[in-house]
Amino acid sequence: MKGIGIGESDFRGLITRDNYYIDKTMYIKDIIDNQSRVILITRPRRFGKTLNMSMLKYYFDCRQDNKELFKGLKIMSQEEKYTSKLGAYPVIYLTLKDAGLMNYEMMIMQLKTIMMELFYEHRNLLEGEMAEGERNIFNKVLSANITDIELINVVKMLSKIMYQYYNKPVILLIDEYDVPIQSAYVEGYYEETIKFFKTFYGITFKDNSYLEKTVLTGVSRVAKESIFSGANNFDVFTILDNEFADDFGITEEEMDKVIEDFKVEDDKKEIKRWYDGYKVGEKEGIYNPWSILNYLKRKELKQYWVNTSSNDLIKLILKKSFTVKDKIEKLLRGEAIEIKIDLETVIVGIENNEDNIWGLMLGTGYLKVVEVVDLANKIYKVAIPNYEIKLLFEQIIDNWFKDKVIGNDLRSILKDLVTLNLEEYKEKFKILVKQMFSYMDVGENTAENFYHAFVLGMLVGLKDSYYVNSNRESGMGRYDIMLEPKDKNGNSFIMEFKVYKEDKEKDIEETIENAKKQIEEKQYEQNLKERGFKNITKIVYAFKGKEVKMEVY
């Protein structure tokens, strides 16, 4: 049996070391068939993007004979239209995976280093003819001594030099194009970065007659107007599109062969539960390749993808956007939710734009589409793809609250609640609210659903022993939250949330009394009583900005 090349993203290395390879060479055919001059393909991290880009590099590159690398693979059985492209073009291969750094100056320095390595790979071009100014800049790039203006222009300059040297148009491959953009947002230098790349890509793509085709890959689709406005004949293919659907990830058919080759038929059902569930366009049953390869190597069913992926942007957004937490709570119960999705991510202010949040989460692999509700208005039903991602959501929710209360973690607060140590619960909860809300913009006019979502997120920690229900009918109305113990002898809870306007004690008391009156008049406890629950505790929360008053009865 061939070995597993964990983390091997170089196609030549994978093939020459005789590692196990799922044949994805028909991706080459799909790229050739696509008529767009600039192609952006977005897929979740660790879905084989870099390996596929490396494969394109070795296939098209005219500088060396790579026929042996593709011997016996699917692309070589295709017609001459495709096989004739083997070794047909000079190739510029650029990866930005290491360009996400702590500040703008460090990012620019790293880009200059990346360009230095790229130009060193093509140093043979110095043997050919080029303008004196281009030769000077070429040598400056090799010493990582170019100006920022020169940096913006060097890829276009290199494509021109290569075109003239080889007398052939150039294939440009840019992998992980969005890493520096996402890092810039997380680290706080987004505006400078987006201005740089808008100019960089505009100069590189626009009216560049030296390029045959450009292929970019990344995780997210950054809005075209913010970065690619200068690109002509530009097409984006996301996980909602049928194009390139089979080219990334492991399909059901491919997985059947993997299971047979590695003789793990006994684990087939559990492998599917853990790592299957992704959908690209209309193609269902896509497995996460990183997790599968790690499982095959270690023969252990556990989290692999989530421990290596960059979750910084997702965590930052969810930390700031408590309005999505009630929907996440439904997802964790195994429900599909109906949402509007915009995959053209506008990162600035994304935490305040739910459409963009869900789009980013879908594109980065945290969700899957289970039904197209209204294509024209971008309405979809989505769910969590598999058990591995479900565990990640639970961990993220736990981390929202972890260590935010001095001397107490979330488990301690929840324990005080369910054991009816309610005075301690109230005090710890007040501290939690004050400390958590200091991390985000919470105004005095914040709506009830914000606080509702906050508490829902906290209560997910009780999922093993409680059913956490939200906004469901009981009696003559809809309660805010009901905690129903899985053990009928346990303590159950009804929670109601209100916002008070003034700091006057009278106004606070009136708000609390109105909430209590609502619980009683609407008979929220009726549903619990009818099903035999006796230990029912009611809690009213009255919020104002970062302050909360509570009454338990």
Image (spheres, helix red, strand yellow):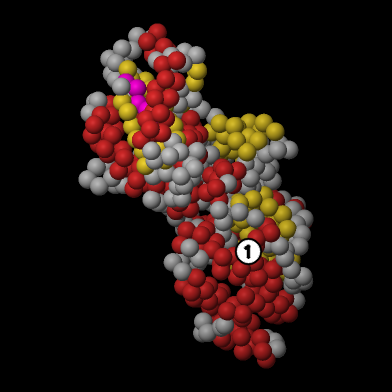
Residue corresponding to mark 1: 173
Q: Is residue 133 left or right of residue 103?
A: right
- Magenta-colored stretch includes residue 344: no
Q: Quadrant of the N terminus?
A: top left
Comparing 441 with 393, the one in front is 441
Residue drawn where x is 22% and y is 45% of the image:
407
Residue 294 seen from this side: no
Residue 227 in percent (x, y) is at 65, 62
Secondary structure at badge 1 equals strand
- Magenta-colored stretch includes residue 540: yes
Q: Identify the image quadrant of residue 489.
A: top left
Magenta residues span 537-541
Main secondary structure of the magenta stretch: strand
Residue 108 in percent (x, y) is at 52, 74
* 478 versus 279 height, above or below: above
Residue 309 in percent (x, y) is at 45, 51
Q: Identify the image quadrant of residue 534.
A: top left
Q: Quadrant of the C terminus?
A: top left
Comparing 494 with 199, the one in front is 494
